Amino acid sequence: MLNQSAEEIIQLINSGIMADERKIISLVGPNGCGKTRLLNEINSIYKNSGNCIFVSTERTGFHPSDLSRAPMTSGRPDKTKGLQSVVDHIITLLSENKKDNGTFSRLTPSQIAGYFCSCVDAVDAALIMSYREEIDRMADAAPDANRTIHLPPKPVLMKNQVEKIFEEIFGYKCEILNSQNGRDRQEHKLIFENNGQKFDMNGLSSGERQILMLSILSIVENGNNDLIIVDEPELFLNEARAIDIWGRVEKAFPASTFVYATHNVVFATRVEVSDAFIVTRNTELQKNDLSRPFPVDKLRQIVGTRVQLLRDDLPPIFCEDGMAKLILEDIVDPGTAKIVALAGCEDVEAAMNGERHWQLLRSSDERACGVLDRDLRSDREVEILNQQNLFCLDVNESEAVLLEPKILSASLSAAIGSQVTQEECAEMLVHAAAERLKGNLIQLSSLISRQNCPKLEFEIENYDVSAVRIEYNKSLDEVFKCKASDFSNAIKYKNTGAILKLFGSKEMYRTLKIIIHRKYRYQLQEPQIRYRENRSLIKPLMQELDWVANLKQQLQSRIQLQSVPDC
C-alpha cells in the first residue's frame, strides 16, 4: 500500500501528464525523513510503463541504480530499427554486470558511452545508405538524361543531434569520434572541449557522468520519458554547477516531468521549480509557497549545520568547498574551531562581512575568519585579504594538496602496490601542466582583461556631451607576457611549487588522472573521496609542507583571540 505522501505526488504528476503540463517537483528535507523511500514508491508505480528513469548516485561513486524495465535476454540491437532497441541493450549490459549490492563490476560509464556512440554511428550509416538507395531508385525511374530529378531532403544525422544536446547540457563543445583501433576494431569516443582543452569521459566529474548516463537513456528514447526521478541531484556537484547543469537537462528534455529529492534548499526553491514540498521526519509533506521566504524553522532542520553550528562557542572558519574543509580539519588543532564549507569565494566573503542574511545566521564572534583558494592572486592581494581576516592557501586550489609530489608518491604507491618515486610524480605533474598551459593562459588573459578595462571620461556643455576620453592600459600586452612567462618557466624549469600555485588544480587533477591511467592502468578517485580514503597517509605528509605550517600559525593566532560575547 502506498504512503499517503507518495499518493499526493503521484496525483500531481498524473495531473501534469494528463494536461500536457510539464512539472518540476522538489522534495527537500533533513537526513532520515524518508525522501528516498518516497522516490522508490513513486518509481514502483511508473517503472513498468517504460517511460520512467530513476537516477541515483551512491556516495562511493557513480552507479545508475534503477533501470525502469525488464532487460532483453540476449542479442545485440537491430541496426535497421535505429535507436529503438539501443536503450534495451544498454539496460541488458547494465543488468548483466550488476552485483548483489547494486554496484556494477565490469561495465564502466566510458564503456556505455562508447557503445552508445557506436550505435549512433550505425544509425547514421543506415540513414546515409537509405538516402543513397532512394537517389539511385529515382535515377533508375528517370532514364531521360535531360529530366530534372528533385532530390529528397538530406537526412538529419543522429550524430549532429546528439552532439548538440550534450553541448546544451554540459556547456562544453562535444564531438563523437570514430577511430580505428587495431586491424578490424573501431573505437568510438565522446570528446569534450572546454577553454581550448579536450578531454574524454575521464575528464568529467562523477556528478557530470551521472547526468551523461541519464542523457544517453533519454536521447535513445527521443526524450519520450514522462518522468525522470533524481535522488540527490547536487551530489558530486557544487551548488552553482548543480543548478546550472540540471537546468540544462530540463531544457534539453522539455516534455519530461522531473521529481528531485535534495538537501539543498537553493536547488529546491529555484525559479524553474513548479511545486516544492518539505518532507518532515515522519515522511509527511508540507507544500512550500515559492513566492515567500523559506520557513526559518524548517531551514534549521534541513541545514542545521549552517544555523546551529554557527551559534556554537567555537569560532567559525569559512572555506570555499568540501575539499578545503577536509584539509582545514587536519590543519587546525582539534576542538579549537568549527570548519564551515560554503560554495565559493563570494560566499566566504559574504559570510565574513555579514551579507546575504549571514548576520542572522551566525554570531558576531570576532575570531571568525575565512580561507580562500589562492587562484591567481598576487602577493599584495593576499596581504590585503589577510588584513580582512581572509587567509589564502598557498596553492591555486585545495585539490593541489593531492598533487604535491611527496603526497602523490606515497598515496599512488600504496594504491598500485609498487613504488612510484617523487621524481616520477614531479615529471607527471610537469607533463600535466604542459597539457593545461593553453587553457590556463586563456583564463589568465580573461582575468587581466577584466582587471584592465578601458577607463572612459566625459564632459558636459549645454546639456550635451562635449568631450569623451578613453584611457587604455597601453602596456597590457607586457603585463600579460610577464605573467604568462611565469607559467612557461614553471614548466621549463620543472618547478612543481610554482605549478601548484599557478595552474588551476581541479583541471590539473583531471589531466593527471588521465596520465596516471595511461601509465599505470589505475583510476584515481574524485579528490574528496581520495583524500578521505588516504587521510591517515596524507595528513602527516601535508603538515610537513611549509605553507601549511604558515597557514596553521595564521589561523591559530586568529581563533585563539579572546572572544567578545554577543550583546
Image (cartoon, rainbow, N blue to C red):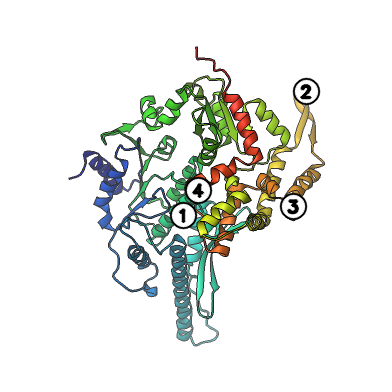
Q: Is residue 392 visible?
A: no
Q: Secondary structure at mark 2?
A: loop
Residue 521 in percent (x, y) is at 53, 64
Residue 6 in percent (x, y) is at 25, 42
Q: Residues within 10 Å of mark 2 (few under 14, many from 20)?
A: few
| Nearer to me, 296 or 32 | 32
Using the image, determine if residue 420 lies above or below residue 277: below
Which of the two discs, 2 and 4, sits closer to the camera? 4
Q: Which mark, by number, is residue 488?
A: 3
Using the image, determine if residue 343 lies above or below residue 192: above
Residue at 75 percent of width and 55 percent of height: 492
Q: Which mark, by number, is residue 462?
A: 2
Q: Secondary structure at mark 3?
A: helix
Q: Secondary structure at mark 4?
A: loop
**Amino acid on which the number 3 mark rests in the picture:** Ser
Which of the two discs, 3 and 2, sits closer to the camera? 3
Residue at 68 percent of width and 50 percent of height: 496
- Earlier in the chain: of badge 2 and badge 4, it is 2
Residue at 57 percent of width and 59 percent of height: 419
**Amino acid on which the number 2 mark rests in the picture:** Asn
> Quick one: quadrant of the N terminus?
top left
Q: Residues within 10 Å of mark 3 (few under 14, many from 20)?
A: some
Q: Mark 2–mark 4 contact, CB under 8 Å?
A: no
Q: Is 253 left, or right, of 494 in this rendering? A: left
- Earlier in the chain: of badge 1 and badge 3, it is 1
Q: Which mark, by number, is residue 209?
A: 1
